[in-house]
Image (cartoon, helix red, strand yellow):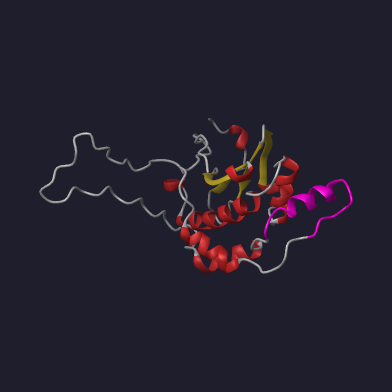
């Protein structure tokens, strides 16, 4: 997957990273065994819905994801897991003069999302990306249809707009005092879904973010 520019300010986008094996394992356990949905032959919204749904494999329901979060993720408000400290040079060895010392982030999802948000975000990321990955011609209507079918109400979907062959969106997943949101870029095999940080209180207003 390609990288997309990070967001700063109110909605900070995390750095790109490989999808976590934990989330993949959890989704494999939750995946349903049902066959794909047949296409609808009528026109209008039903045709858009059928075309969108027909391109993806069944995903765990939102209720299953929420149940898994309740059973497996840390409780609300659990502090974030600190990033690992840079490894020290072995005894008797000096680090190279041009060695780059990793700097721990001071803002963004890694430090602003609590442990429950981080755990839940992994599951939502994999589920949504898997549903959008093989979507041909990802228009806003098709992306909204898939998100709705996954159980995400329109009130949680924000700033859904198309730019070229890519449709971008934000998803407000705040609950129980958390600040989790997702920023998505639906672009076929280049689809990216990643965590972002929403305001602690108040309405979700992605238009106020700063690039």
Query: Residue sitting at 74 percent across and 54 percent down?
Result: 53
Task: Give above or below for 210 relative to 90.
Answer: above
Residue 2 falls left or right of residue 149: left
Task: Name the residue nearer the viewer: 210 or 162.
Answer: 162
| Rendered image quadrant of residue 104 | top left
Query: Residue sitting at 62 percent across and 38 percent down?
Result: 205
Q: Residue furthest left?
A: 92
Tell me residue 36's x, y (percent): 73, 61
Q: Is residue 6 magenta?
A: no
- The boundaries of the magenta stretch are 38-57
Task: Name the residue nearer the viewer: 43 or 69.
Answer: 43
Q: Is residue 69 something one can see in this rendering?
A: no
Q: Is residue 45 magenta?
A: yes
Task: Give above or below for 121 relative to 137.
Answer: below
Q: Residue furthest right?
A: 42
Tell me residue 102's x, y (percent): 31, 41
Q: Is residue 81 something one can see in this rendering?
A: yes
Tell me residue 79's x, y (percent): 41, 55
Task: Name the residue nearer the viewer: 94 or 200.
Answer: 94
């Amino acid at each position: 997957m390609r990288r997309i520019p990070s967001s700063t300010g109110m909605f900070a986008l995390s750095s790109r990273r490989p999808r976590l094996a934990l989330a993949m394992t959890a989704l494999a356990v939750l995946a349903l065994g049902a066959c794909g949905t047949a296409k609808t032959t009528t026109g209008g919204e039903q045709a858009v819905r059928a075309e969108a749904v027909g391109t993806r494999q069944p995903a765990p329901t939102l209720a299953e994801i929420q149940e898994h979060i309740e059973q497996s993720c840390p409780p609300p408000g659990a502090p974030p897991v600190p990033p690992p400290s840079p490894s020290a040079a072995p005894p008797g060895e000096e680090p190279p003069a041009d060695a780059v010392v990793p700097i721990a982030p001071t803002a963004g999802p890694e430090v602003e999302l609590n442990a429950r948000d981080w755990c839940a975000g992994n599951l939502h990321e994999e589920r949504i990306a898997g549903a959008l990955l093989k979507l041909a011609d990802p228009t806003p209507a098709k992306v909204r249809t898939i998100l709705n079918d996954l159980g995400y109400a329109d009130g949680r979907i924000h700033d859904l707009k198309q730019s070229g062959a890519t449709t971008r969106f934000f998803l407000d997943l705040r609950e129980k005092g958390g600040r989790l949101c997702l920023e998505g870029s639906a672009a076929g095999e280049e689809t990216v879904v990643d965590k972002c940080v929403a305001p602690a209180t108040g309405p979700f207003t992605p238009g106020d973010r700063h690039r």
